[in-house]
Image (spheres, helix red, strand yellow):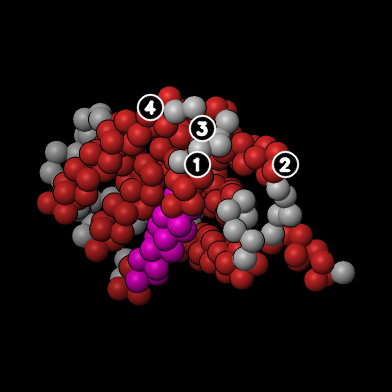
Amino acid sequence: MWKRMLQMILVRNLAGKELTDEKIRDFRKMVLVQGLLISTIFLLHLFQYLGFPWHLQIAESIFFAVLGYYVFLMWDMLRNYTTSRLVVFLNFVLIMGVFVLGFLAVNPWMPMPLNTPYRLILTFIQSCLLGVESFLIYFTLREFFKRDLSMPMRLWGAACIYLMIGLAFGSAYELICILQIDCLGVDIPLQTMALMKRCEFSLMVLSGMDTPYASVSPLISSLATVEALWGQLFVIFIVGRLMVK
């Protein structure tokens, strides 16, 4: 019984129209959660402007809660692309394990000492998160460029990939800033707010906006150039792909 339940959880036995409909639902859910994740960055500034007590911790807690659901959805989407129980199971253990470890390490209500072991833990967390994001982006891109996709799947898939790339670059910036805390020209504590700021910076770069950081490190500047160019190219790819029948 337990073995059968585990098989049902790990792999979806769907095909044809059922699988297509499931992929569209997953794309929609992912875009919605990505929108909520981005909205929490706005809440960080809104709560500060309104003068809420514990405004930083509240905004960070909301961000972290939505992030937990986001990483779970990444694992859930992976089940659409592979029938390997081992791959799905290992990704589930990795994603959930990293999330629990991240909750203990960057809990906004329990600041941790900034020392070498702590930085190594953060590096491991962000490396795993970036790896899973990159893995899913690869599979989703492969799906997006198939010939037989319906228009709804193309639209939701394009939005999902675009926002996922922005958030993945946020993880990449965070990795760099763990090694060099003032890589954006400001000293931001390595807690949940730090990742929020890196994601905010990434989304600004991806959308072509000017960022408020005037003294970023050369490595961050180079990576931002790559992201900006990729963002422009991806828009061209999206337009071209949507026009293909």
Amino acid identity at mark 4: Val
In magenta segment, residue 134: yes
Location of residue 215 (image quadrant):
top left
Query: Does residue 221 appear to the left or right of 232 in the view shown?
Result: left
Say whether marks 2 and 1 touch (CB < 8 Å).
no
> At x 22% / y 34%, what residue is drawn?
211
Residue furthest toward the bottom? 117
Distance between the Cα atoms at labels 2 and 1? 17 Å
Amino acid identity at mark 3: Arg
Q: Tally the numbered discs.
A: 4
Q: Nearer the viewer, residue 124 or 169?
A: 169
- Mark 3 / mark 1, whichever is N-terminal: 1
In magenta segment, residue 194: no
* Label 3 sits on residue: 154
Distance between the Cα atoms at labels 1 and 4? 15 Å
Location of residue 148 (image quadrant):
top right
> At x 25% / y 30%, what residue is drawn?
208
| Circle on res. 239 | 4
Task: Give the vertical position of 222 relative to 24 (above or below).
Answer: below
Distance between the Cα atoms at labels 3 and 1? 10 Å
Which-is-in-front pick, marks 3 and 1?
1
**Label 2's element?**
helix
> At x 82% / y 66%, what residue is drawn?
4
- Mark 3 / mark 2, whichever is N-terminal: 2
**Label 4's element?**
helix
- Mark 4 / mark 2, whichever is N-terminal: 2
Amino acid identity at mark 1: Lys
* Span shown in magenta: 120-137
Give percent across and percent down for residue 68.
56, 51
* Label 1 sits on residue: 146
Q: Nearer the viewer, residue 194 or 113?
A: 194
Give percent across and percent down for residue 165.
38, 44
